[in-house]
Amino acid sequence: MTATAASTSLASGEPPINFAAHQLRAGNIAGARDDFEQMLAMLLAAIHPGARAISANPGDWGIDILLGELSGLVVIWQSKYFWPIVTRSHQGQIRESFDSAVAAAARNGYRLAQWVLCVPASMDAPTAQWWDNWRARRQRETGVQIELWHENVLRNLLVKPDCAHVRRHFYDPYAAPSGPVQAPRVPLHDLDPEHDSALDGALFVRQLRAAGHTEVGAAKREYFNADLLAREILDKRVPAELDALDEADGLVHGIWEGQFNSFVVQWPRDATLPGLHASVMREIRSTGGFPLSLTAVHRCGLMHRVVEQRRAGWVRHWRELL
């Protein structure tokens, strides 16, 4: 999220809009795609009351959301949950989606006036340059107006008064009628030398070392404190707190998965995936609406627990380190 978007949300008393929430709601990237498309359908219905979703049965004619009549002139919105960055690896899908929409219009007797790509992220510089060139060329060739709704465009629409119900439904923190679930506030503890030494052989530390990290003291403290918190919740077995812990675990795991997949593409020849750990932790610290009331130390520690549980890692070959 940009600083401007964050400050606007905070100034208005609204929680920041973070599109990683779709992964939390759905539990995985595949489900996040459907959830994001449902959000777009509600958002467009609020902006253009005549907009409607089109189901794939068996194909969707290259249409996710439609405005107009399939007997005449139409505008199509194409939903693509590319996360956390739109990169070169996504260009083929963009081209294929547009070509499919153009071909379906010609085949089925209606006219495509505008095609809008909707993504919950921003493009990196090479992809943005490709998009500008591709868009200009395809507009000339087809006569179809092509537009991009990236993360900032979507946020600006979601904060409009007419769209407030969409923002609340998809992006406000989950809360029970009496307020959000509050986990026990375990004080932050420093590691004593014995515990610090014992964690030297931990899997999450070995994963960090393999990624080239020389200093891991902060990571050990994050893991230690998150593990204390998780153990207390598991020992007490309060259903609401157990559910909240599961949601928080799913959120950090989903953030890692999205970032890992992106970094694998960005660094095809570097097994250490430079910057992956820092990028994941930065997003975890900034994500709003966590289902548990956690400090930044606990949040990052939950990610280390996922690594320790053999479900993630910090290098391309992380499974080989298990």
Image (cartoon, grey):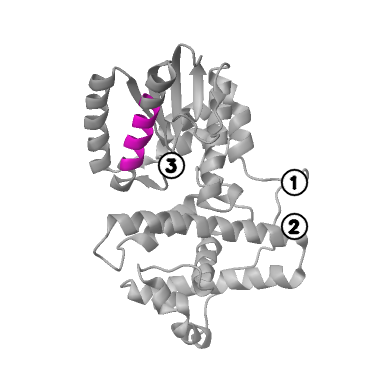
| Residue depicted at x 44% and y 54% | 258
Dot 1 or dot 3, earlier in sequence: 3
The amino acid type found where label 2 is placed reads Ala
Q: Residue at x 33, y 19 (%)?
A: 145
Q: Secondary structure at mark 2?
A: helix
Residue on which the image places disc 2: 240
What whole-number distance in Å separates the C-alpha atoms at marks 1 and 2? Answer: 10 Å
Q: Position of residue 120 (x, y in %)?
A: 44, 39
Report the residue marked by disc 1.
176
Q: Residues within 10 Å of mark 2 (few under 14, many from 20)?
A: some
Question: Mark 2 and mark 1 in contact (Cβ < 8 Å)?
Answer: yes
Give the mark nearer the N terminus: 2 vs 3.
3
Measuring from the top left, give residue 29's x and y in whole percent: 50, 51
Q: What SS does tag 1 mark?
A: loop
Is residue 243 toward the left or the right of residue 252 in the image? Answer: right
Between 239 and 25, the one lying in front of the other is: 25
Identify which residue, 50 or 158, lies in the foreground.
50
Q: Residue furthest top?
A: 72
Amino acid type assigned to the residue bearing label 1 in the image:
Ala
Q: Quadrant of the C terminus?
A: bottom left
Q: Decide: marks 1, 3 in contact (CB < 8 A)?
A: no
Q: Position of residue 88 (x, y in %)?
A: 28, 46
Quarter of the N terminus within the rendering: top left
Bounds of the magenta span? 92-102
Q: Disc 3 marks which residue?
A: 1
Q: Main secondary structure of the magenta part?
A: helix
- Report helix, strand or loop for mark 3: loop
In the rendered image, residue 268, in percent from the top left (x then y), is placed at 26, 60
In reply to whether residue 101 is colored magenta, the answer given is yes
> Disc 2 versus disc 3: distance between alpha carbons?
29 Å
Q: Residues within 10 Å of mark 3 (few under 14, many from 20)?
A: some
